[in-house]
Amino acid sequence: MNDGTANYPAHLVPVGHVEPVPRRVRGQVGGRTVFDTQRALYLWEWPAYPQYCVPVEDLTDAVLIDEERAGRLSPGPARRHSLRAGGETRRGAAWVWAEGAPSAIVGTARFQWEAIDAWYEEEEQVFVHPRNPYVRVDAVRSGRSVRVEVDGTVLADAPGAVMVFETGLPTRYYLERTYVDWTLLRPAPQTVTECPYKGRTSGYWSYVSESGSHDDLVWAYDFPTVAVAPIAGRVAFYNERVDLYVDGVLQPRPEPLTRADWDKKQRA
């Protein structure tokens, strides 16, 4: 529940929640499909998004090797396993849930996302983490003016925007590029990020002012997913690091809860 410090909806799913995945889920390593399942489960290890739990019987061209290392993750106990696919072994690739975890997931494997080269839901590749079935992501055209400043310098001033409302995150304002002062920004070609809901970024830009360097302040999705097609070619600024005015009113800088923040809260 939102504690009143943020002006956007919070995530509501508790840690340890389990639901069925109604989609076919596949993972590839080295071009080889290592699991292919229609029986995956969603497991929330923290409220923002779930992980997939894959029945070990649905591994196809790979095997899991017990590393004889037990651990306890937020939903319960598990044993760490390596993944052997072809001639390659990836250590620490998966946790297999043990007794004491939610009963539905006992004996299933939760793979480290980065241990799998490519994840697919049906025929579409998924980036970063599974899409949360309880999250909405809406790209809405708006006639509200948006001005962006850093240290009093105007970086953008647009008569409208596409506003992206994503559960658990601050509203993002995607602006037409013609309303951005590109003389003040420099490309950051090494920076590329991915989002399970929007796709892969096509560009980042930084700003250098007298107060210092503001790296990776602006980004764009030239080829976003169909769900947020209106943001194509537009750019957005990190609300957390700029002064953003909507219809002339300065917006509070959001402080979204990161996973590190959540883990710290859990330990407190």
Image (cartoon, rainbow, N blue to C red):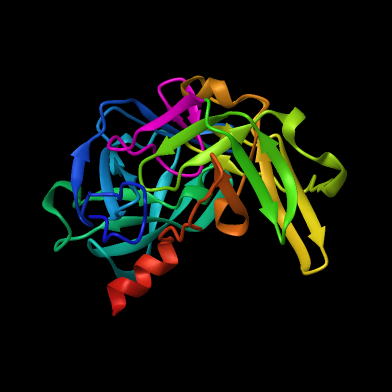
Residue lying farthest to the right in this orientation: 183
Q: Which region is colored magenta?
A: 119-142
Viewer-nearest residue: 210 or 64? 210
**Placement of 62 over or under 67, stated as above or below:** above
**Placement of 235 over or under 10, stated as above or below:** above
**Placement of 262 over or under 25, stated as above or below:** below
Q: Is residue 152 visible?
A: yes
Question: Which image quarter holds the N terminus?
Answer: bottom left
Residue lying farthest to the front in this orientation: 248
Q: Where is residue 197 in the image (x, y as percent from the top left)?
A: 47, 33
Q: Where is residue 84 in the image (x, y as percent from the top left)?
A: 49, 49
The question of residue 162 being in magenta is answered with no
**Placement of 80 over or under 195, stated as above or below:** below
Relative side of 123 to 71, left or right: right
Viewer-nearest residue: 184 or 186? 184
Q: Is residue 68 visible?
A: no
Q: Quadrant of residue 240?
A: bottom right
**Residue at the image point whose x is 81% and y is 62% from the top:** 209
Relative side of 176 to 174, left or right: right
Viewer-nearest residue: 177 or 14? 177
Q: In which quarter of the image is residue 248?
A: top right
Viewer-nearest residue: 104 or 3? 3
Q: Where is residue 87 in the image (x, y as percent from the top left)?
A: 58, 45
Q: Position of residue 119 (x, y in %)?
A: 48, 35
Question: Which image quarter holds the C terminus?
Answer: bottom left
**Residue at the image point whose x is 36% and y is 56% from the top:** 6
**Residue at the image point whose x is 81% and y is 47% from the top:** 185
